Amino acid sequence: MLLRIDHETRLTYSAPVTESVIEVRTAPPSQDDQAVLGYKLRVTPPAPVTAYRDGFGNRVELFNITPPHREVVIRAAACVRVHRTPAPEVLAAVPWVPDAPPSVDALEFLRASPQVDFAPAVRAFAADIPLEDCTTVLAVAEAITVEVRSRLRYEKAVTAAHTRVSEALELGSGVCQDIAHLFLAAARLRGLPARYVSGYVHQPGEIATHAWVQVWAGPDLGWANLDPTHGKWVGADHVVTAVGRDFSDVPPNRGVWKGDADEAIAVTVGVQPADKVPADLAEPADAPAWSALATANGGGRNERLNQQARNRVFRQQQSQQQQ
C-alpha cells in the first residue's frame, strides 16, 4: 500500500516568546517492510534543520528559533510504500520459552522505563494474565492483548502525554498510548521483550499520530508489530516512525522556550492512499521551505530587551499525546 502522510503541529503563544529549541520525530525510516519514497519537513518561521540519529536509531530533526515569535508551525509530509507480512504467518512456529536468556538486542526492552513503571498494581495485573497454555510467542502476545483491552477502556481526554502506565491503570481508561504502555509493562514482566512504536495508521476517524508495540520474535525474525488498541497484528495500513522504550523516547515534538506566555498545541494528521509519489514530495531535497505563516516580529527593541530580562528560564514545550 502506498500512503501519503501529512502532519502539522501548530504551537501558539499568548505573547511573544524566544529561543525555541525543538526536536521532531516525524520521518518514517525505510525498513524491510516499508520504503520511504519521499519526505519533507518545513518549519515556520523558517529555520535551519539539523538531522541526527538517537540511541534507538530514529531520525531526529532539530531546529532553533531565536527571535521573538508567537507561533511555530511544523509541517511534515511523507510518502511510504508498506509491504508488511502479517505477523501470524511468521510467528505461529516461534516457541515461547519464558526462561530463555534474552538476546542482547532485546534486553533493554525487558526493563521498566520512565512511563512504563512496575508499580505493585502493574505487577499484579501482569501476574494474573493466564499464559499457562501458551506455547508460542504469537499466543502469548495475543493473550496479553486480550487482558489489556479488557482492563483499559479507550477514552480520550482522561490522560496526558506524560501519564505513567500505573496512573492509567488506576483510571481504567486511556488512549492508544496508554494501552500500548500497559501491554509493554505486562509483556516485560512476563519475560517477553516489547518496545513502543510511534507512527501513523490509515483508518477512518484517525486524525492524530498512533501508537502500538513490537514484540521480540528472536534474532532470526526480529520485531513483530502488534496494535493492542485495535486488537490486531499490524498490516500494510500502519507506518512506523520511531521506536523506543515508551512514549518519552519518541515524542513527535519536544522542546523548550523562553517567555511569559501560555502555550497551546494543535495537531492535524492526514493519511491517505496514493497512486504515485506526489509531485511536491518528488521535488529536490534542497527545495525552498514553505512560505512563512507566522511573524517573528516581537515589537520594538526596548520591548524585546524587557521581555528577555523578565524571562531567563526555559519552559517545557507541550508534547502531542498519541491518540
Image: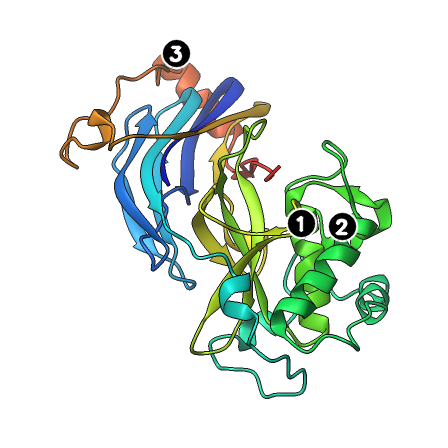
Secondary element type, mark 1? loop
Left or right? Give the position of 75 relative to 238.
left
Q: How far apart are the two marked residues, 3 and 1, measured between alpha carbons?
A: 52 Å
The local crowd at label 3, few if under 14, some if 14 to 19, many if 20 or more residues have their Cα within 10 Å, is few
In front: mark 3 or mark 1? 1
Secondary structure at numbered mark 3? loop
Q: Tell me the residue that label 3 is attached to.
A: 299
**Residue 272: quadrant of the picture:** top left
User: CB atoms at circles 3 and 1 under 8 Å apart?
Assistant: no
> Which residue is drawn at the image coordinates 58% and 88% (left, top)?
101
Front residue of this view, candidates 133 and 305: 133
Q: Residue 140: image x %, image y %? A: 69, 69
Residue furthest out toward the top: 300
Q: Position of residue 266 (x, y in %)?
A: 54, 24
Callout count: 3
Residue at left offset 51%, top offset 82%: 103
Cα–Cα span, label 3 and label 2: 52 Å
Residue 20 on image: x %, y %: 42, 34
Q: Which amino acid does label 3 sit on?
A: Gly
Q: Mark 1 = which residue?
A: 231
Query: Does residue 123 appear in this view?
Result: yes
Residue of label 2: 149
The quarter of the picture where the N terminus appears is top left
Q: Amino acid under label 1?
A: Gly
Circles 2, 1 touching at the beta carbon (< 8 Å): yes
Per the image, label 2 sits on a secondary structure element best described as helix
Residue 4 in the image, given as x and y percentages of width and height:
36, 32
Q: Quadrant of the C terminus?
A: top right
| Number of the label disc, if any, that sits on residue 251 | none
Which mark is nearer the camera, 2 or 1?
1
